Every structure is written in structure tokens, then in C-alpha cells.
Amino acid sequence: MKKNMMDLMKIGVVIPALVLSMAACGNSAASDAGKSAEAPAAEAQAEQETEAAEPAEAAEAEVKEAEEPGVETTYENGGLKMTVPAEVANKVIVETPVDSDDGILFEVSEKASVEAAKAKGSDYDGIGWLYAIGVRDEESFHKMLCSDMSGEEPIGYDADGNYYVFFHPTDVRYERETPEQMQADQDQWTQVVEWGNTMKDKFLEENAGITKFNWSGTVLEAYLARTAYDKEAVYTLSTLEFAKDGVLEPNENVDAEKYFKMMTEDATYEVIDDQDIDGEYVVLNFPEDEVRFDFFYGEDSKNLIRQVWGDYEQIYKVTFADETKSANDIMDAWARELAEYR
């Protein structure tokens, strides 16, 4: 289109020059020679001006293309929806797989990174990937809770027994054809990454039938999940009160899942700076992994837990939405129920 427009612009300049030359045919020979010399000069000047205008027009078109806003778009899959706002709509690629083997419902990548990888002729699988949202059944979801869940976050569940997971890369997937482009587009990459990080909550807001799954993603929570869902897990509880009769082992009459949920459903866990904690505690021990968790008694430390493995230790603090609850009260009740059946 630009080339055609340039040709038309050239014709518009050259034709008037020829008309003027023809109108001067009745003049003297000297005048004819002068006019003949002026026409090529005018044409050359017009061509130079046109060629100079071409890059400016192209640059202006690129700016307009870059500034052109996208259109807010809602994608649907499996009876669920996910809306991409206008400010990033033309910067991402959204896929909605049908009957995905790994349960993926929505998968989102940065468009420019994918295109750069293709242009370079490299394998672009995973390049530009920002996040994915998938669904799992109860068994596989519980198994996930017992792991370190690198790149996976449990986000919700529904009344039909479906559990929803937010997947994200654990490395940087940013790509451009040149280092200069990498530097120039850094703000765009940051924009789409930051937007992607908001989509866990946005997805839940948009799909009212899904209830948020509360999870802080700590090692402690994973070990608590193992007591409930890992049939191969070897663990014991113990307190000074029951120490004379040995440790307390799991019992089929005691529902470990009940205590797991009490410890996690409305709880927020965080690792805090090391501090001196003294006094009695309930011990949750995993001897095969050589790791234990000490749940302290005491008004000031009832929600502090010490993790010990080898020569290392760290302190967790748990905050319950129900302020009447405490970690030590729950673990003490668990130990006492186990003691009834040994």
C-alpha cells in the first residue's frame, strides 16, 4: 500500500511538470531549452522529497500500531471463563485446549517472545509462557499438596470435586531477536508478567462457583498434608506427657485429615527471623526424612513452630482467621486422641 501511494505521489508531481512544459511550446528555442532543463530538476527534487517522507511515514505507522489498544476478550473452556483486559490483549496468546491430558483450561504466553523465537528458527515451545490454569481430580490434587509443588499453586475447588491449579514458570521465558530488542521491550515483558500474577484472584472472582483454596506454600503445610493423604508416610507425634509410654503412631480410628484441615483451612504461614523459643512442645516427627516440627505451648509461642532437620532449623508463625484457634491446641488435641487408641 505504501509503494502504491508513493507511485501516485510521484505521478502527481511529474504530470504538472510535463503540462507546464507543453504549454510553453510556443516560446523561443532558448525558453524551450530552459523549460526542458527545469522539468527533470523538478522531478528529481520531488522524488527526493518523496523518498525522504517514506521512512517518516513508516515510523509513524509503527508508532500508531504500537499504541493501538487491544480489545478486552473473554475466553471460555469447560464451562469456565477468563477475561484478558484491553491493555494486554494484543500482547498475549491465549490457548484453550480441549480435553487436555494434564487438565489445562487456559494457557497464556507473551506474543512477541513466541514470534521472536519463531523468527530465530529456534524451538519456541515454552518460550514466552506466562501462566496456565488447569483442573485436577481430588486424588491428584491431594498428591500435589504432599509435594514441593514447584511451579504449581492450588487456588480453588468446586462442589463437583474439581480442584483448580495455577501453573507458572520457575525461570524466565523472555525472548527477542536481538539484545537491543530485549532491552527496549523490557517494560512490556514486565507489564504482562505482573498482569499474569494477578490472574489467580481474577479467575476466582470471574467464576463464582469456585471457592478459594487457602495455601501458603510452605514445607510445613506439605508435611501436614502427608499425614492426611500420603499412605506411605511414616510419622509420629509425641509430648512430654505421653513420653513415658513412647511415641504416638497413626491410628485408623483417628482422622488425620481433620487435623490437617484445622491447621490449614483458615491459616496463613510465614517463615520469621530466628528467635529463642523455650518450653514444652508437641513434636510431629518424620524419622525417614530426618525432619521434625515442634509446636510450642505457651501464650506467646502457641502459634510458633520450629522445623529441625540435620543441623538446621527455622521458625514458622501461623495466623488463623479464627483468633480463638492456636496451632498448639490443635496438635495437642491430635496427640491426646491418638493416645486413647494405643
Image (cartoon, grey):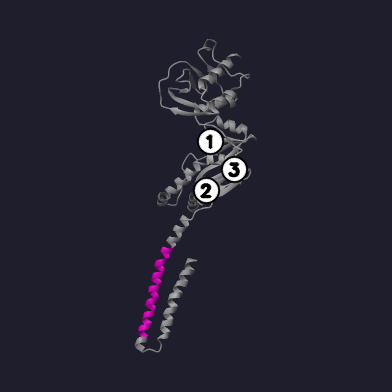
Of badges 2 and 3, the one in the foreground is 2
Quadrant in which the C terminus is drawn: top right
Q: Position of residue 78 (x, y in %)?
A: 63, 43
Q: Secondary structure at mark 2?
A: loop
In terms of secondary structure, where does tag 3 sit? strand
Q: Which residue is mark 3?
A: 105
Q: Image point 37% across, 86% down: which residue?
A: 32
**Vertical arrangement, residue 88 with respect to residue 340, above or below:** below
Q: Amino acid at mark 1?
A: Glu
Q: Is residue 164 visible?
A: yes
**Tag 3: residue type?**
Leu
Membership of 268 in magenta stretch: no
Cα–Cα gap, marks 3 and 1: 15 Å
Work out whether residue 71 or residue 183 is closer to the camera in this orientation and state it.
71
| Residue 314 x %, y % | 44, 25
> Which of 45/66 is in front?
66
Q: Which residues are magenta?
A: 32-57
Residue 261, percent from left and from top = 57, 26
Q: Nearer the viewer, residue 83 or 281?
A: 83
In the figure, residue 214 lies in which quadrant? top right
Q: Do the CB atoms of the residues marked 2 and 1 lie less than 8 Å apart?
A: no
How far is the residue under mark 2 from the one under mark 1?
23 Å
Q: Position of residue 119 (x, y in %)?
A: 49, 53
Disc 2 residue type (three-letter): Pro
Q: Which residue is mark 1?
A: 153
Identify which residue is drawn at 45% across, 61% down. 61
In contact (CB < 8 Å): disc 2 and disc 3: no
The correct choice, above or below, for 199 with respect to 213 in the image is below
Residue assigned mark 2: 85
User: Please, what secondary structure does the residue beneath circle 1 have?
Assistant: strand
Whether residue 232 is visible: no
Q: Are marks 3 and 1 in contact (CB under 8 Å)?
A: no
